[in-house]
Amino acid sequence: MSEQTGRSLADKLNHLFATAKPRGGGEYSNEHVAEAIRRAGVTISQSYIWQLRKGKKHNPTLKHVQALADFFGVPASYFFDDEVTNRVEQQLQLLRAEQERRETDAVGSDMKLMAMRAGELSQERRRQVLDLLDVVYRLEQAERRGETDAPG
């Protein structure tokens, strides 16, 4: 990773949001992070986090810096020391690559197992499995779109 000195607190915070993903992908919302920090005992709002991310606020209290660092699992010095920032980001990049490799391996293993088992089924049973797979697929797509009723 190249030297990235002089980046703002907003840049560093946004990088954490872009890099640290919840299970299932996507990006943490400001509200999710604020709620988690409030549960840990520190008062903070999603709008304050938004202001920090947009650079409209750039001098947070130490307790807010520590709470954000704790949420993302980085040292508080990540926000102030470019050497620490670079070291943490290299570690995050390696961790993300390892997670993606494991997810790819797991998907590949699941796919192989399904194919092996399907190959041992009769034509009629394979058709039933495909029908079931189609129903499950449509349900998941509806969930992702935020629909609550089952597709029909």
Image (tube, rainbow, N blue to C red):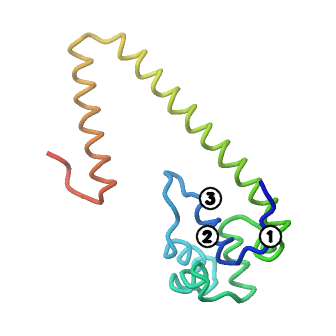
Where is residue 67, by image quadrant? Answer: bottom right
Q: Residue furthest left?
A: 152
Q: Disc 3 to disc 1, how far (Cα)?
A: 18 Å
Q: Disc 1 to disc 2, how far (Cα)?
A: 15 Å
**Residue located at (53% from left, 85% from top):** 45
Figure quadrant of the C terminus:
top left
**Residue located at (50% from left, 53% from top):** 25
What residue is pinned by disc 2?
A: 14
From the image, state whether disc 1 or disc 2 is nearer to you.
1
What residue is pinned by disc 1?
A: 5
Figure quadrant of the N terminus:
bottom right
Q: Residue 59: x percent and y percent?
A: 71, 89
Where is residue 144, by image quadrant? Answer: bottom left
Front residue of 54 and 42:
54
Contact check, label 1 and label 2, Cβ < 8 Å: no
Q: Residues within 10 Å of mark 2 (few under 14, many from 20)?
A: some
Left/right placement of residue 55 relative to residue 132 reads right
Q: Is residue 13 above or below residue 147?
A: below
Q: Residue 37: x percent and y percent?
A: 60, 77
Front residue of 40 and 22:
22
Q: Which mark is residue 19?
A: 3
Q: Residue 151: x percent and y percent?
A: 18, 47
Q: Is residue 123 above or below residue 68?
A: above
Q: Residue 122: x percent and y percent?
A: 26, 10
Q: Earlier in the sequence, mark 2 or mark 3?
A: 2
Q: Earlier in the sequence, mark 3 or mark 1?
A: 1
Where is residue 22, by image quadrant? Answer: bottom right
Which amino acid type corresponds to the residue marked 1 in the rendered image? Thr
From the image, state whether disc 3 or disc 1 is nearer to you.
1
Q: Is residue 58 above or below residue 33?
A: below
Q: Earlier in the sequence, mark 1 or mark 2?
A: 1
Left/right placement of residue 116 relative to residue 7 reads left
